[in-house]
Amino acid sequence: MATEEQLREGLQEMAKRFGPAVSNIAIVKSVDEENATCVLIDEDDQEFLDVRLRPVLTGKQSFLQVPKVGSFVLAIRIEDDDDWLVIAQDETEKFLWITPTAKIEVSEKILIEANEKNLLSLMERLFTVLEKGYQTNNGPTINLILTPEFESIKNDFKQLLK
């Protein structure tokens, strides 16, 4: 009589013969960020086309993790379909998070936007005001010349950051 382990291995072998595996470790050949898909090559040099980087194909953007070309990923089959989805990767090219009012993108640099405000442009405005905005007199006090601009930047930061 077969042991439990032998039965398990036999069922796994039979499943492999009659259908594709439910998960696969493969190398990223190319990435189509606009369509949130990639092409993978497994250890048998079999290509998997249009592998999803996003589980739901509604056209809406919310979260995208872009794997680096040439890196290893773990992909799983979606239900009983022939579609595949990347669920993990060893190297990441870019992360993108989008909500109705905010966006964070992490790649070689970081982009933070919220409520139509961009952190980099706010920082540039702030440094410009700080650079040009002080007037000294003979006493120990320093007066801010560009007070309205400074207050505007301060309010914009409050709209951008939590």
Image (tube, grey):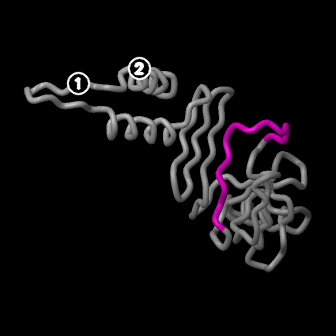
Do labels 2 and 1 touch, CB within 8 Å? no
Q: Position of residue 132 (x, y in %)?
A: 34, 38
Residue 143 numbered mark, or none:
1
Closest to the observer, 98 or 14 = 98
Q: Is residue 65 magenta?
A: yes
Q: Residue furthest front?
A: 138
Question: Which contiguous range is marked in magenta?
Answer: 56-68
Q: Residue at x 44, y 27 (%)?
A: 153
Secondary structure mainly formed by the magenta segment: loop
Give the residue type that dot 1 points to. Answer: Asn
Question: For the residues marked 2 and 1, what is the alpha-carbon distance in whole angstroms?
Answer: 13 Å
Q: Position of residue 5 (x, y in %)?
A: 66, 62
Identify the residue at horizontal 77%, vertical 44% (top origin): 55
Q: Residue at x 45, y 22 (%)?
A: 152
- Quarter of the image where the C terminus is located: top left
> Which numbered circle lies on residue 2?
none
Tell me which corner region of the image, top left, top right, bottom left or bottom right, holds residue 154.
top left
Q: Earlier in the sequence, mark 2 or mark 1?
A: 1
Answer left or right for 48 relative to 145: right
Query: Which residue, given by chain and number where applicable, does mark 2 sit on?
Result: 148
